[in-house]
Image (spheres, rainbow, N blue to C red):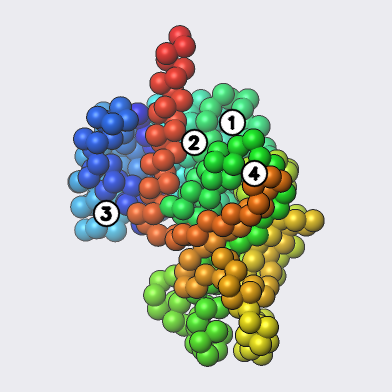
Amino acid sequence: MRIILCGFGVVAQSLIKLFESREEELYSKYGLKPRVLAVFDSKGSAIDQSGLELDKLIQVKEKFGTVKNYSEKNNSMKGSEILKNVEADVLIETTASNYKDAEPGMTHITTAMKKGMHVISVNKGPLALAFPSLMELATYNQVMFKFSGTVGGGTPILDYAKNSLRGEKITSFAGILNGTTNYILSNMATGLSFDEALKDAKGRGYVEADESLDLDGLDAAAKLVILANWIMGMKVTMPDIKCVGIRKVTIDDIKKAEKNNSVLKLIASCDKELMVSPKEVPKDDPLGVNGTLNAIAFTSEHSGTQTIIGKGAGGTETASSILRDLLDIRQEIAKNWNQI
Ligand code: HSE
């Protein structure tokens, strides 16, 4: 499988390490032989049409902070140029999410789809701003579009709702979709002020470079958009979400929840409306998880309410979701071969 990798941050590097450490098993068990033809980060690119050496890629990135030093040839190509010039089967998009214009991820994804490449994205920006039209573009170009890692990191939330509950009608769902704000609110419940809890979360590297994405609920809202489209069949984008973050949560709000035998959580919900907002959750409710955990409760017509709990972020966790998507694509391609 020929791959172009957009972005080379923690998640993409974890994916390369997964490819390396599981090489034999991926081939013997799943028939998957990933061949990474091109990678780029914000400073440069590495390209080899016959496949890059994965251990060298990691070593170069660790030593120089960029893949540019992998080779002197073709080391300054931009993502869009690479996508136009390199023939591959799958684009894996891991550049940072932004909710203003979703670039550069949007251009990477649309260029790849128009070229007939399958796409895996862990970048939430393009999906949050244009989910319905990206699905149409994928269908029009007859390519697969996968994004398991955008919600729940390595916890298969989208797959659970879409596949494990197939045949069911999910009527509503609600959950904690942002680990950073959960960590901050959990610490406030133990007596820390908002500023102290935020400082602690920053010290642990949990908070996004643009803190507003976590604190103002944008990350949770983006995940809600993805869930609403994919699980509920809605055609919505970011402006359709009523969104309130956690900046205004006070110690008094936390104490009030405590009095009600509850905890305050940033809840993303899809019921009569789509909303992200701090809400009281009873302490014994499965959604009352602490730390950086994510949790989501799906309520369906016949099978009641089920809650999935797991880590919602992390390099290896999110890389494992990309691998799941890649295996799905490999399996679909194999099915089509059998039909020919
Ligand atoms: N900032 C996000 C979180 C990372 O805290 O959950 C995963 O999308």
| Whole-percent x, y for residue 11 in the image | 38, 53
| Whole-percent x, y for residue 56 in the image | 20, 46
What is the three-letter code of the residue carrying label 2?
A: Val
Residue 170 in sight: no
Tell me what residue is drawn at x 69 percent, y 69 percent. Answer: 277
Tell me what residue is drawn at x 46 percent, y 25 percent. Answer: 332
Q: Mark 4 points at which residue?
A: 231
279 lies left or right of 155: right
Marks 1 and 3, the one that precedes in the sequence: 3
**What is the CA distance from the residue labelled 3 to the residue labelled 2?**
24 Å
What is the three-letter code of the residue carrying label 1?
A: Ala
Residue count near mark 3 (Cα–Cα under 10 Å), binned few <14, some 14–19, many ≥20: some
**What is the CA distance from the residue labelled 1 to the residue labelled 3?**
32 Å
Marks 1 and 4, the one that precedes in the sequence: 1
Label 2 with label 4: CB-CB less than 8 Å:
no
**What is the CA distance from the residue labelled 4 to the residue labelled 3?**
38 Å
Label 1 with label 2: CB-CB less than 8 Å:
yes
Label 1 with label 3: CB-CB less than 8 Å:
no
298 lies left or right of 45: right
Marks 1 and 2, the one that precedes in the sequence: 2
Q: Mark 3 points at which residue?
A: 61
Query: In which quadrant will I find the N terminus?
Result: top left
Residue count near mark 2 (Cα–Cα under 10 Å), binned few <14, some 14–19, many ≥20: many
Element type at mark 3: helix
332 lies left or right of 271: left
Nearer the viewer's eye, disc 3 or disc 2? Answer: 2
Q: Mark 1 points at which residue?
A: 138
**What is the CA distance from the residue labelled 2 to the residue labelled 4?**
19 Å
Element type at mark 1: helix
